[in-house]
Image (cartoon, rainbow, N blue to C red):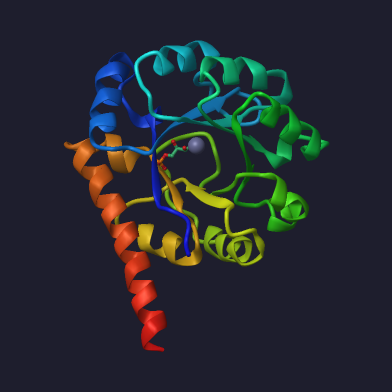
Amino acid sequence: MRNKIKISASILAANPMRFEEEIKRIEAAGIDLIHIDVMDGHFVPNITMGPFIVKGIKSITKVPLDIHLMIEHPGRYVEAFAEAAESNGIITFHIETVQNPKEIITQIKNTGMKVGVSLNPDTPTEMVENFLDQVDMVLVMSVNPGFAGQKFIPKALPKIARLRNIAPDKMDIQVDGGVIPENISQVVKQGANVIVAASAIFKTNDPGNAIKSLKQIAEQTIEKGADNLVNI
Ligand code: DX5
Ligand code: ZN
C-alpha cells in the first residue's frame, strides 16, 4: 500500500503582496500542504521568510504548514516556527546543517510538529539512513536550494528509489525543485509521495487547476503502476 499523494504548494513563487488571495485560492482547490521556504542568506544564497510571516499565514488558513528550513543552526528557531504554525504541520531541517541529528529530531517532536530531514542534491542518502525510523519524512532536493524556477536535477531519482526501498512504509518521501507536469510521473514512480511545486502552480494562469492536474497525473501514475504489477 503506497502512501497517499500530497501536493505541497511553495509560496516562494506566489505574489507576496497577495498571499491572502493566493492562499485562499489554493485552499479552495484542495491543496494538501503549504510549503514555506525559510532561507537565511548563509546556508543558501537568498533570504526569505521567518516566523513572523508564518504566523500571518497560519492566521488565514487551516491547511497544515510544511516548513522547509534552509538555515544554519536550525535548532535555534524550531520553537518559534512551531508556535507560529500552531503546531500544525511539519518542520524539515537540512542534514548538512546539524552535528547531532537525533537531538534536533527530538526537539522538533517535542513541539508537536512532525519532523522531516532534507538532503541537498550532492548529499548522499547514507547521511540519513541511520535514523529513517525516527522521522516522518525525508525531503530529497532536486535543485540546489535557494530559488524557485530552477531546472530539475535527475540525480535525485535514484536517491528517491533507494530511500523508498529501505525506509519504513509509513515514512513520506518529499521531492522539491523543478517539478512540473512533464516530470512528476518520474518522481512518483521512484517512490516520492509528497510533491512540492512553486512555479508549476503559481506561475500559471490558474493555480487551482495546476494543483488538480499535478495531483491527477501523480495518482494516475500510481494506478498504472498497480496495473503493471497485476499484469506481470
Ligand atoms: C528551492 C525551494 C523550493 C522552491 C521550488 O530552494 O526549496 O521549495 O520554491 O520551486 P520550483 O517548484 O519553482 O522549483
Ligand atoms: Zn522548499
Q: Is residue 38 left or right of residue 106?
A: left
Residue at x-position 42% and y-position 12%: 56
Quarter of the image with the C terminus in it: bottom left
**Residue 210 on image: x %, y %:** 24, 44
Answer whether residue 183 is visible to the viewer in this image: no
Viewer-proximal residue among 37 and 171: 171
Residue at x-position 70% and y-position 56%: 124
Residue at x-position 47% and y-position 34%: 147
Q: In this view, does 220 lie to the left or right of 65?
A: left
Count of marks, rendered view:
0
Q: Where in the image, quadrant-wise, is ligand 1 located?
A: top left
**Residue 171 on image: x %, y %:** 59, 52
Identity of the residue furthest to the left in this view: 205
**Residue 91 on image: x %, y %:** 59, 31
Vertical relation: 96 (above or below) 213: above
Residue at x-position 55% and y-position 43%: 144
Vertical relation: 67 (above or below) 190: above
Place residue 117 in its image quadrant.
top right
Identity of the residue furthest to the right in this view: 100
Viewer-proximal residue among 36 and 82: 82
**Residue 19 on image: x %, y %:** 32, 19
